[in-house]
Amino acid sequence: MNTYEKFRNMMDNHIVLSFKGEINSDIITMVLQIMETKLDAVSEKSSVRKKIFNVLVECMQNLYHHAEAEVEGDIHTRRAMLELFYDEDFYYILTGNYIKNVEISPLKDRIDRVNSLSKDELRQYYREILDNNIISNKGGADLGMIDMARKSGQKLDYNFTKVNDDLSFFDLKVKVDKKRDN
Amino acid sequence: MDNFKIEGTKQTPKIAFSASTGILEISGRSIPENTFEFFNPVLLWLDSYSAVAPQKIVAKISLEYFNTSSSKYILEVLKRLKGMLNDGKEVLVEWYYEEDDEEMMETGEDYQDVSGLPFNIVAKED
């Protein structure tokens, strides 16, 4: 693919921003700042822009706390990806990061549980988890998935791709409806 | 007791706790990765404050965005206030949200429910 084709490809897929690289606190701050500037320029309602930014914040927090490092020789790097794109009806926030194979099953259970709940049940579940007074050492407090599901009002779409005996690649796609009013 | 003041940034909220008036303001956004670092001094101040606080305490919370790791700490702040309520103080939480931000309104209701504090949930017009 030559550069023009790459460029066309990004245009045709309506990619607002695509990031791949090391995840650290400075990078997160910068990516969110760029995202916010870009969102200010899109023609969606402020409630939709806000929802998208909320989900982005949560996704970056997830990457920060949960992305596993790849190990190449002595070098450990926490690389991950984040992409925001849209089609006619939805904005999509896509993240991808490495995860330890042993962590797949509990994570999958958590997302499936969140996906099985109705709007009201999610709210109830959110209150329960908020109230149980444990702040996990990774800071994520387990509320992230519930929060993203509530904010997006859509099921969370995910996939695991096995990389080797230790690691898999976890991708999560969160949709935000352009037309949803609440 | 000294007032507690932190200016807001792109990641962290403005904190303006006035010891003598009992007006405790948290505003802006709270999206840092290391929420403990930010909130621990806030909680420590509130711990000392409970002994010297005036009879009437009003917390004004006006947040545009916060991440879920901040949400537990916001509840911790409210739990400190609940302690003061249980000690016989008069405590009110004023929860502000932007008019079109239904989620932030619902979040206020969630906190009201979970904390058991009196809340006044107020829409801000742009």
Image: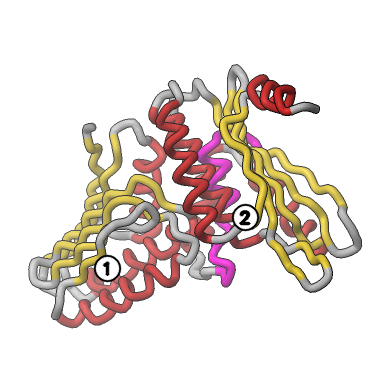
| Residue in front for this viewpoint, A166 or A135 | A166
Tell me the residue that label 1 is attached to.
B81
Q: Residue furthest top?
A: A88
Residue A140 part of the magenta segment: yes
Q: Residues within 10 Å of mark 2 (few under 14, many from 20)?
A: many
Relative placement, left or right, of A152 versus B87 is right
Callouts 1 and 2 close, C-beta under 8 Å: no
Residue depicted at x 34% and y 45%: B64
Position of the C terminus of chain B, as image quadrant, is top left
Q: Chain of mark 1?
A: B
- Residue A159 horizontal/vertical position (percent): 78, 44
- Helix or strand or loop: what does disc 2 sit on? helix
Where is residue B115? Give x, y as percent.
Answer: 36, 61
Judging depth in this view, the residue of A159 and A95 nearest the camera is A95
Is residue A120 visible in the rendered image? The answer is no
Disc 1 crowd rating (10 Å Cα; few below 14, some 14-19, many 20+) is: many
Residue A11 in view here: yes
Asked where in the image residue B35 lies, by quadrant, the reply is bottom left
Q: Is residue B88 in the magenta section?
A: no
Q: Quadrant of the N terminus of chain B?
A: bottom left
Q: Please state which amino acid type lies under the numbered disc 1.
A: Leu
Question: What residue does disc 2 label?
Answer: A63
Residue A94 lies, in percent from the top left, at 65, 39
Residue stretch rendered in magenta on the structure:
A136-155
A176 sits to left or right of B112: right
